[in-house]
């Protein structure tokens, strides 16, 4: 079964897009076939994957507006075999307004992904993973990402305000699971931007592990200049500088994520986490 994960956090600057593209790259380097869907109008994931997303490029907006299928917008990511991407352009910014009046507005992305996954299965080229990079908000685009996925990968930065707004996100996940997508759950939490020189970072790690237990992945992603530089070269850090601390950390994150069962019945609910 294809594992479909939404990478979400309505707080900006937490390493969400960075986590999406680098985990995807690392999974592909493990031999997995991985699709990244850029659901953020800023198109940062598209930049990091080195795929075209200039004005006029067929993108996720065209899919959500029902003018084309996912298969017609997907591009190969040249640096890593097995890694493909669905780009976002600035056109996507208008999707939330345009979709408001649509009866099936929450299900557009889900229908597109399900259709593409079925096509790939039938063609004998099944996908192992779909990772959806959501914008830093809890609007209709993020809602589409949550309805389309079965799992949420939640990045939390090791800084002050790390848990700010987290209860709101968890309530949203629980609401989506209760009304729109009963399979949805937070399967993994990754701690990002760790600075071992500060006591605060260690305190945040301790607090997150106390609240969320086993769902917090063992590896903590450190702050890394190489991670920040990689997108400017249209690469993920796992290809830009494979020996850097950031690349090593994201490869470990990918291995740990790959070891998690997508159908783990014992996974705590989002409501339970928000009550904790």
Image: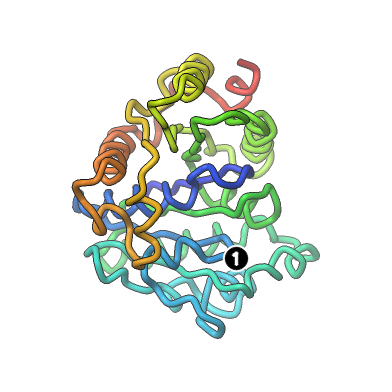
> Which residue was labeled with disc 1?
41
Q: Residue at x 64, y 73 (%)?
A: 65
Name above or below for residue 166 compared with residue 51. above
Location of the C terminus (image quadrant): top right
The colour scheme is rainbow
Q: Nearer the viewer, residue 119 or 138?
A: 138
Q: Report the number of numbered marks.
A: 1
Answer with left or right where residue 149 lies relative to residue 169: left
Q: Position of residue 166 (x, y in %)?
A: 63, 31
Identify the residue at image location x=43%, y=67%.
47
Picture coordinates of residue 161, whole percent (x, y): 62, 30
Q: Position of residue 128 (x, y in %)?
A: 31, 52
Residue 24 position, x and y percent, is: 34, 52
Residue depicted at x 41% and y 59%: 36
- What is the quadrant of residue 250 in the picture? top left
Q: Element at badge 1?
A: loop
């Amino acid at each position: 079964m294809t594992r479909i994960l939404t990478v979400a956090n309505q707080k900006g600057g937490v390493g969400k897009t960075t986590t999406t593209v680098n985990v995807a790259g690392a999974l592909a380097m493990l031999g997995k076939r991985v699709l990244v869907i850029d659901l953020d109008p800023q198109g940062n994931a598209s930049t990091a994957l080195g795929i075209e997303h200039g004005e006029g490029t067929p993108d996720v907006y065209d899919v959500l507006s029902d003018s084309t299928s996912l298969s017609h917008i997907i591009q190969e990511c040249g640096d890593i075999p097995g890694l493909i991407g669905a780009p976002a352009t600035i056109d996507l910014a208008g999707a939330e307004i345009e979709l408001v009046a649509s009866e099936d507005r929450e299900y557009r992305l889900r229908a597109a992904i399900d259709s593409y996954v079925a096509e790939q299965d039938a063609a004998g080229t099944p996908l192992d993973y779909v990772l959806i990079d959501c914008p830093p908000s809890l609007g209709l685009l993020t809602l589409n990402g949550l309805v389309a996925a079965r799992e949420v990968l939640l990045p939390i930065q090791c800084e002050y305000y790390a848990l700010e707004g987290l209860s709101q996100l968890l309530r949203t996940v629980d609401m989506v699971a209760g009304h729109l997508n009963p399979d949805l759950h937070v399967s993994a939490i990754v701690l990002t931007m760790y600075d071992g020189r500060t006591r605060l970072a260690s305190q945040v790690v301790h607090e997150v592990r106390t609240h969320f237990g086993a769902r917090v992945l063992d590896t903590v992603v450190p702050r890394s200049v190489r991670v920040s530089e990689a997108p400017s070269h249209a690469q993920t850090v796992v290809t830009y500088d494979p020996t850097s601390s950031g690349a090593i950390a994201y490869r470990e994150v990918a291995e740990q994520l790959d070891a998690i069962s997508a159908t783990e019945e014992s996974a705590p609910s989002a409501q339970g986490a928000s009550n904790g």
